[in-house]
Amino acid sequence: MKQRQVYLDYAAVTPTDPQVLEVIVDVEQRGLGNPSSMHAKGKVARDIVEASRKTVADALVAHADEIIFTGSGTESDNLAIQGVARVHKTHGCHIVSCATEHPAVLETLRHLQERLGFEITLLEVDGNGKVSADQVKDAIREDTILVSVMYANNEIGTIHPIADIGRVIDKYRKQNKTIYPLFHSDACQALGALDVNVEKLHVDLLTINSSKIYGPKGVGALFVRRGVKIAPIQFGGLQERRLRPGTENVSGIAGFAKAVELAGQCQKKEVRRLTRLRDYFIKQVQTKIPNTRLNGHKSERLPNNINISFLGVEGEALLLYLDAQGIFASSGSACTSEKLDPSHVIMALGVPHMVAHGSIRFTLGRFTKKKDLKYVLEVLPPIVKRLRSMSPIKVNES
Amino acid sequence: MTDLEQDNFQPWFYSEIVREHFFHPQNFLDHDLELDKYNAMGRAGSPACGDELRVWLWVDENDERIKKFYWRTFGCASAIAATSMTSVIVLEGEGMTLAEARAITPQQIMESLGGLPTRKIHCSVLSDKALRDAVNDYYRRTKQFDKIEPEATRIVDPIARVTDKDIEEAILSGAKSVEEVAQKTGVRLNDPRVGQEAAQLVKFYLEKYQG
């Protein structure tokens, strides 16, 4: 008999939706040309890209010309941050961001700081992983050109008050009669789960990504508000208003648009369903297993995110025992990271090393059923118990 | 979902031997050990990543061969497998002599496991160290002080030239916090990497000597 498989790593990558797959295959099979070509096959390819652009723009309540297709969320973050830095460095070299950002943002900022002399302020988060609009307000200086704060954290699911931060920035700009600072948010985890209306969020730049919403891998987009100037970070042809040269990934872009459309259709229902499943799972784990810790905010978190530390257990070992039972999750343990550093997100919560070491992230999604979670809840407690019995570190029984 | 083992793609990160020892660890201590069931104890830790290992040996005092080897470890799959494998190597046949046990190297353990990912070698093979610590402990308990061999040191702060040994000694001479250790050793806490490692070492040694 084939082993039961429960995929709970949707925040890492979502499986491609069958309807999206159909669109991709259909576009590929049409044997279209290069969207830049002056013939029928090129024109149809161009139309597909532009129709997709419109679909994505609509989801953000933006104009089509404000959407730049890229190759990934990481690329969008790079384009946003480096793109702003290159144009606006004449005004100032200070950027405000947050300690728990995705590496796509943190490493880009580090590059600007170490190689190009920018000054970076990384805001600390509270015990739930949140920054406040007041913190942002206090960090803004005259030479601040950009604020970049993610919408929702990929590891612990905590939602930052992006609309509040946006309003604070707007107010600062009005009071000081300046266009600075610009405001970027990485919304890769938020798309499909939270309201991504760019007007309500008051963002100038917004990163989104296809592979987190059941679309194909290797496609992302960056919203760039009309009037906001950024510079390209790679050079070539005229595609994507010169901001992202290179032949368009037509079928990927069409698949992304289909994924955006599907996500919009089921968002409300899906958020309710996932929130219920999430809270059920957290409560069950806390009832069945002693000495656990929920990482991230209890309610202001993504509907599909569960991040729990099993104190006294090392995350990779737990992950692989689950893997052997067909359960696929992820961990913030140092042992699972390439650099052998514990999760910077969990460490930023101001908790002991052991919390990061024993953290497991379960992220739910469109194909997660309650019976899948019941299976995990059956398998998990004895595994934790066994690994704790093998450990010399004793956790207080409380 | 499709079968993950098709087309010769490997769904498992480590060797088959690691898998066997990880899922079926040998000689780990799943109960509390009576004091008369062991006569040497050793520990090792990798404060940088939080791994920790303890071993308990029963050494036959007549021929000084290791007859029992119990362990507990807090660590990843390769740490668990490496410790399990070490216990098997040590107990094979009539049990290793203390001199033989001391000579076990991380490379030897790694080879017995069918190899480990490079980045895992440094942190997950701690069992040789814990074993040497236990051998020293045996000599200490049997008052053969001349046979104790202290472990080599490692530099924690390359600029202030502070080693793990310095930190251990600071704790032994009464320091009770990272700040007190910094005062005694000069380790630079304002360097985040150094500070973090120093803090972990302080915690480790405080537990070792006072906990």
Image (spheres, rainbow, N blue to C red):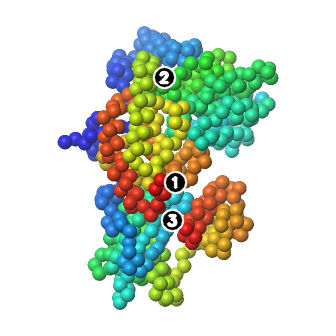
Residue A11 spot, x, y in % from top left:
45, 35
The amino acid sitting under disc 1 is: Met
Q: Distance between the residues labelled 2 and 1?
A: 45 Å
The amino acid sitting under disc 3 is: Gly
The residue beneath circle 1 is: A354
- Helix, strand, or loop for circle 1? helix
Toward the viewer: A230 or A5? A5
Residue A349 spot, x, y in % from top left:
59, 45
- Return the mark for residue A153: none
**Viewed as shown, does residue A129 lie left or right of B10?**
right
The residue beneath circle 2 is: A248
What residue sits 39% from the left and 64% below the top?
Answer: B82
Task: Mark 3: give few (<14), some (14-19) or many (20+) Cα within 10 Å.
Answer: many
Q: In which quarter of the image is the C terminus of chain B?
A: bottom right
- Helix, strand, or loop for circle 2? loop
Label 2 marks a residue whose chain is A
Label 3 marks a residue whose chain is B
